[in-house]
Amino acid sequence: MANRRPTDPPRISTAESPSPAKTPTVHKPLGKKAAAPTAPTPIEISEEVRRGMIAEAAYLRAERRGFTGGREQEREDWLAAEAEVDVLLKGGHGSPAQ
């Protein structure tokens, strides 16, 4: 006899659900202000390391597009990679849209 798993998720009856009255409430302490967000700290590296990061990022961009497009596309890849690395090194937490 084959053992079949049900396709629907198990249902929880309302009797088993926690009631809103039993849910704990979290209060913030009075008198304390939230810390102000601080500016990101720039990362300091040598120009050689920065250039290597840019070269790798530009290569990965070219690889994603199948290495097509010639010199002009290579230049665009380099400039976009340079901007991306500079944002990263300045302490940005995301990368610019590609």
Image: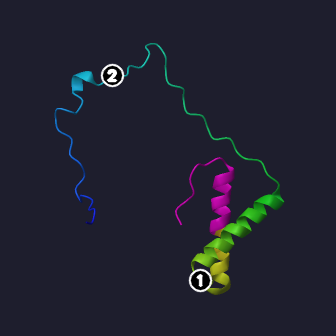
Closer to the chain start, of discs 1 and 2, is 2
- As for residue 81 lying within the magenta part, the answer is yes
Instruction: State left or right for residue 34 relative to residue 1.
Output: right
Q: Quadrant of the C terminus?
A: bottom right
**Depth order, front residue of 92/76:** 92
In the image shown, does 3 or 46 lie closer to the viewer?
3
- The verdict on residue 92 being magenta is yes
The numbered disc on residue 24 is none
How many numbered tags mark residues here?
2
Q: Which residue is drawn at 57% across and 79% down?
A: 65
Quadrant of residue 83 within the rendered picture: bottom right
For disc 1, the neighbor class at 10 Å (few under 14, some 14 to 19, many from 20) is: few
Q: Position of residue 20 (x, y in %)?
A: 23, 26
Q: Specify the amino acid type for callout 2.
A: Thr
**Which residue corresponds to the image point at 68% horizontal and 41% vertical from the top-left?**
41
* Residue 46 in picture, x, y percent from top left: 82, 54
- The answer to whether residue 47 shows anywhere in this view is yes
Q: Where is residue 52 in the image (x, y as percent from the top left)?
A: 77, 65
Residue at (22%, 33%) from the top-left corner?
A: 17
Residue 67 drawn above or below residue 53:
below
Residue positioned most to the left: 14
- Amino acid type of the residue that numbered disc 1 sits on in the rendered structure: Gly
Residue hosting label 1? 66
- Residue tagged by mark 2? 25
* Callout 2: SS: loop
What residue is drawn where x is 24% and y is 58%?
Answer: 6
Indicate whether 25 appears above or below 12.
above
Q: How crowded is mark 2: few (under 14 residues within 10 Å), some or many (20 or more)?
A: few
Q: Give the range drawn in magenta.
A: 80-98
Measured as percent of width and height from the top left, residue 93 is found at 58, 49
Eye-nearest disc, 1 or 2: 2
